[in-house]
Amino acid sequence: MVRLLAALLRLQDWARTSAPRAARRADGERVLFLRPDRIGDMIVSTGVIRTIAAAPGVQLDVLASPANAPVLAREPLVHEVLILNRHGLAKIWQSIRAMRARGYDTVIDCMPTAPSVTTLMIMLASGARRRVGTLGRGLDEILSPAAPSLPIEAHIVDHLALLATPFVPSDATIDPSPVIELGEDERLAAEARWAAHDTPVSGPRCRLLVNISAGKTARHWPIASYADVIAAARAIAPSLTVCIVSAPHDRERGEALASLTHGHYLATRTLRDAFAVVAQANLFFTPDTSLAHAAAAFRVPTVDLLLAGNASQWGLYRAPGINLECPGDSLESLDARVASETLQQLLSAFLEQSMTTARNA
């Protein structure tokens, strides 16, 4: 299927060779970044999206999914967020018409490590004359230009950063670190929720947020293990404020953990609510999921529990914290004592830094 779609894109290029080339837009190059997939994928792309959007002469739109579009809700550099709705042919056709109506000059393939049938179909449907993607995926002939490629084990953010190279000067320094923009109203609402549970302390305050939810079964960790980790953290910081978050379907487990550990369960109605709660934490403990990438974007020190072999490509990117890989093929293979010691290490460093800051104030 990938070869067929690549052939159709080449045919589209051939058909255009006899057509007169459209004049360059007076308002610059209209570019579409394709990201109609998962929340975490959008978060790790935000730094690259911002880099391209800030390039001279570029007006950048993003094609998102209903799930990940909220990530860009407050992003000022993106001109427009289009949503690809896949629920029925009529919805898909409506999304394609909206995309075609904008007359994009360039479309960016968001899958830098392997070709995607869905992405190729969208590139074909977009009608854009210029296609940007990475080399070495069997698609070199349809890209104009093709960006270089990296070894597969490189971090996904570094893979994505290559997509910005056609838009910025060759000597420019690119920082592709994830960024999520929050509104002051969102931060204040989350701060009020935390403040309602803060433990009165005479010294530095410390808030630990624990997330228990992850999309894949292999990333589930026993509630008893989370309880052990929280107990170990309280052993060195008795006044620690502990809050628990989860996906809606895990609320019962989250409330059970809060009760077991004398913590507080924070129900989050929306993805943006969850982001804001993460941003107001001092430390975060979570299985590898989109909220781990959100914490990296907010520079919240995090213990990120990952499946074996995933840290190099999907761990925290240029962010404070520790990538902790399990030894087996599921998080259940991770010993709670190892995770506890890892969080204690991060917590001790945070408390020491906070005390130093307080003394120097």
Image: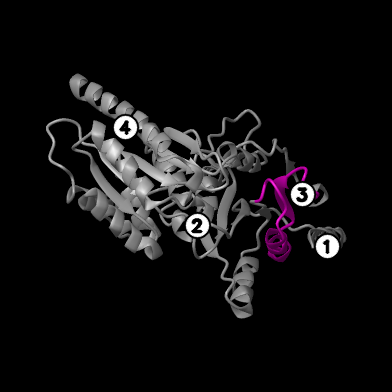
Image position, residue 233 (x, y; %):
29, 36
Q: Is residue 229 left or right of residue 106?
A: left
| Residue at position x 46%, y 54% in the image | 214
Q: Is residue 183 visible?
A: no
The one of 338 and 57 positioned closer to us in this rendering: 338
* Residue behind mark 2: 215
Q: CA distance from mark 2 to mark 1?
A: 32 Å
Residue 4's tag is: 1
Q: CA distance from mark 2 to mark 4?
A: 27 Å
What amino acid is at disc 3?
Leu
What amino acid is at disc 4?
Leu
- Of badges 3 and 2, the one in the foreground is 2
Q: Which residues are magenta?
A: 111-138
Placement of 85 over or under 291, stated as above or below = below
Image position, residue 330 (x, y; %):
53, 48
The one of 189 and 238 positioned closer to us in this rendering: 238
| Residue at position x 68%, y 59% in the image | 119
Classify mark 1: helix, strand or loop.
helix
* Residue behind mark 4: 347
* Residue behind mark 3: 143
